[in-house]
Amino acid sequence: MAHVYVASAFSKNNTGGNKAGVVLDSTNLTVPQKMEIARILGYSETAFISPSLLGDYKIEYYTPTDEVDLCGHATIATFSVLYHLQKLTKENYLIETKAGILRITVDQEGMILMEQNIPTYGDILSPTLLTPSMQHTTSSSPIQIVSTGLKDILYPVSSIEQLHALEPDYEAMIELSKDLDVVGVHAFTITHTDHVTAICRNFAPLYGINEESATGTANCALACYLFKHYKPQQEYIFEQGYNLHSPSQIIARIDYTEDTIHAVYVGGKGYMVCERDIEV
């Protein structure tokens, strides 16, 4: 029997967000059992926590179909659970993941920020390469693969109307993701407002996630993309999930001098949804 907490990460005004399962003690669970728990829960990711010799916690992430190296929203969900259960005794933590050792900060109001890797900028893609899976848009910004831990295709869209109207061909996107060795496609449109930098949609059908309402790793990559191609700044605010009727808010912060990025963080707030026991 596994005791599972469900929390919603990157919530906006304590609503919406992206739900993830959290198992706080997974030491005695086998890989098939973790896969089964993730499948039964059916969320895009479930986090499994165990002791770490390299940090405060070791976290493994499973989708309903596979294991992934890192998941931003499941990490925020994990620390939301720990915050709610009053198990956090300091502001700074180290977590061990398959993407590396990462820092987490939690303030007194429950804002959780997760360090990601320094960005790597991959290929700039021709719009025609994505035509089979996505409608062509008129944005003049480049389509590029960027990673701060997981590789995503960052896909600029010219307007909010075009963004909401996107109807991806998921089978074609699965083949594209395999060919380019990426998690999926992160579509966005810049809002040109002070309180929100961009509205986003994220598609990762290769991992059983046609669309999700909040994506930490992809939005951190997007902040680094905007730093390079749009405007360098310390904080970017993204909103996601409107097409899924689950509006979410994701904060990305960048430490930099001139045009050099020294550290990147992504985060937000979360809230507890429920608890359940799963027989495995």
Image: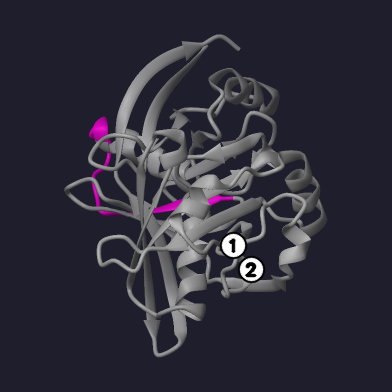
> Label 1, on which residue?
154
Asked which secondary structure carries label 1, the reply is strand
Q: Is residue 235 above or below residue 72?
A: below
Query: 76 or 53: which is nearer to us?
Result: 76
Q: Where is residue 88 shown, x and y percent of the image?
A: 27, 42
The part of the image, by quadrant, that contains residue 141 is bottom right
Residue 61 magenta-drawn? Answer: no
> Label 2, on which residue?
143
Q: Where is residue 252 shown, x and y percent of the image?
A: 38, 62
Query: 276 or 91: which is nearer to us?
Result: 276
Asked which secondary structure carries label 2, the reply is strand
Q: Residue at 64%, 68% (x, y): give it.
A: 143
Residue extent of the magenta highlight = 84-97
- Asked if residue 116 shows in the view, the reply is no
Q: Is residue 98 above or below residue 18?
A: below
Q: Where is residue 73 shown, x and y percent of the image?
A: 45, 44
- Asked if residue 270 shows in the view, the reply is yes
Distance, label 1 to label 2, CA atoms, is 6 Å
Query: Residue reaching furthest bottom?
Result: 258
